Image (cartoon, rainbow, N blue to C red):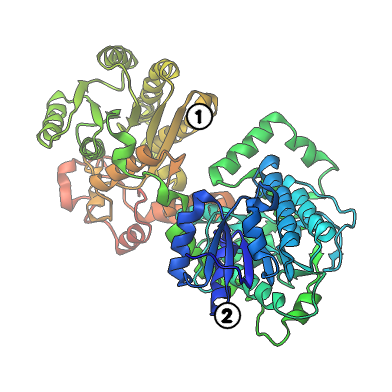
Amino acid sequence: MVGRTALTYFVTGSTGFLGRFLLQRLLAREPAAQIGLLVRAASRERLEGMVRELGGERQVTLYEGDLTQPQLGLGDDAIASLRGSVEHFFHLAAVYDMTADDERNRAANVEGTRHAVELANALGAGCLHHVSSIAVAGEYDGYFREDMFDEGQPLPSSYHRTKFESERLVRSRAEVPWRVYRPAIVVGHSKTGEMDKIDGPYYFFKPIQKVRHLLPEWVPLVGPEMGDTNVVPVDYVIAAMDHIAHQPGLDGQAFHLTNPRRMSSGDVINIFAKAGHAPQLALRIDKPLLDLLPKGLLSAAMKLPALRQIRRQVLSDLGVPEEVLEHIALVPRFDTRDTERALEGSGIAVPELADYAPALWDYWERHLDPDLHRDRTLSGAVRGRTVVITGGSSGIGKAAALQLAAAGAIPILVARSADKLEEARAEIIDAGGEAYTYSVDLASVDAIEEFVGQLLNDHPRIDMLVNNAGRSIRRGVLQSLDRFHDYERTMTLNYFGTIKLITSLLPHWKETGGGHIVNVSSIGVQTNPPRFAAYVASKSALDGWTSCVASEVVNLGITFTTIHMPLVRTPMIAPTKIYDAFPTITPEEAGGMICDALRAKPKEINTRLGTFGSVMKAIAPKAVDQVLHMAYRVFPESTAAKGKSSATGAGGDADSASNEALMIAHLLKGVHW
């Protein structure tokens, strides 16, 4: 690129999000226009590639400099050659980030603007176009007009203060004509959805996505109403700024590039939830409702260290920075009459968010979703890790062990049957994996204690534990009046044996820096099907124990995942012949859920049906009782409960399954009936 001096435009921040779109528009506006771009040495190659992509090699000249240097670091020769040739000086380079610290904000926003003004003055630019922000209005209570600036408004953050100071520099130190543009919260392109980073409302896309995975789209939600906000797409901002910059007679004015009609944050979230096919907020808890609480109660409560830590953890889990949440609500309203007059007849207007939200969501999910850039492979999570799997000789445990071994993990299989354990181990070794086996009676506390001692003697580190072994009993309470031992032996294995194994390993994990525990629970805990009181109670006890203990040991790096497993076709359900006609998932699918738990380490893995069951139990418990009683009457007792031999087979309870029972079983797939 050959240096030129006859420039129409000079632009800072051309590698930024706004700058790239402005450069594209300027190139399209005047094919003969000459454009100078400020570039740091480290960004030169990237900017050259962008210019080539836009086809602007013949029009663009790059000038190496830096925001932190006086007159942006341009040398005397460059300044002398440019003096008097720049008609429009666009200053876009800045930090647009609520989470940036004070030092970074001040260096870019204040000192960078100071040096840009110095350069514009030295060049005798025709007009200095400064991109400010609605943040200059701070927390002004009322209508903030475009001709307003220093109104004594509170400036609550470093970002607000430095944007205010930078605009003040333009107003007070520019010796050339100037125009100021104050965009609202800028989101992606309304046609393509293009965006360069997670910012503003994009922080809520991941929580919306998580809710979508948990609940059907039609489930109504209750959530907070955080106040009013104002978002505009980048193409509107650039089109408006470009048009206003080229209109005569507008020097010395500021223009609000905002939506004339601000929206509530709840409406914005619902629009994006709809775009992402997620449930929406049907009821919102807003400030007037919170004001009904005793004065100062909420603010005082949130100052408590424990509650602040909980708040930070919740926001961290959702990927929402505290700074963003604190300033999402805009106090002032923004007048746009000067902007509307300047754009009159241009056809440039703010599109409705609902019309372009699907494009934003689609682009985020394809390009910006943080999960896209993580190693989400099972191999990356478990390779070389030792994983203890109880009930590992068959069914779900064996299926999980095979998948884990194929991914490079070292399964340690635990069950009673030594023969079946060896068969499973041989299958893993034949496939090229590594595995170890231990024959243990997991219903015996003494046997578990002896096993853990041997385990830690054989293996210097245990990384993960999968509590998969379990006992299920399907029998109504009226058929169990003389069978108290059903409850005892179910609790012994499913609850006492499991927590004995976990607590025996806790000292090891405390010493070695943590471990991850997967508890295979049941969808029955969420749906409470009849005839499973003994089984569901044992799993519910384990869920409750886990929830309490998790908060005690999380600081030690010890974490838990609970899987509310749907009905799986394993030997455990074989005695209940009615299940032969029911839809189930395979052991391989269930093993995949265990692998997902070890890979992603979520707090819970649920089915949508299970989550829906929990929600319905919370909001309409009596209605749920009636529905479950209907199911109780429709489904027959098991052969064992009837006192018949399981050899009855297809002539037993499978034959007695009514059409109504089969319909319910298929409609509510995965529930134990």
Q: Which residue is mark 2?
A: 30
Report the Cα–Cα distance between label 1 and label 2: 63 Å
Of label 1 and label 2, which has the lower sequence position?
A: 2
Question: What's the amino acid at mark 1?
Answer: Ala
* Residue 186 located left or right of residue 410: right
Residue 133 visible? The answer is no
Q: Where residue 250 sits: x, y (%)?
A: 79, 76
Q: Residue at x 76, y 81 (%)?
A: 248
Q: Is residue 403 above or below residue 339?
A: above
Q: Residue at x 38, y 19 (%)?
A: 505
Q: In front here: 598 or 549? A: 598
Question: What's the amino acid at mark 2?
Answer: Glu
Q: Is residue 611 above or below residue 439?
A: below
Residue 30 falls in image quadrant = bottom right
For numbered disc 1, what is the local secondary structure?
helix
Q: Which residue is mark 1?
A: 550
Q: Where residue 583 sits: x, y (%)?
A: 28, 56
Q: Where residue 106 sits: x, y (%)?
A: 71, 45
Residue 255 visible? The answer is yes
* Residue 172 located left or right of residue 189: right
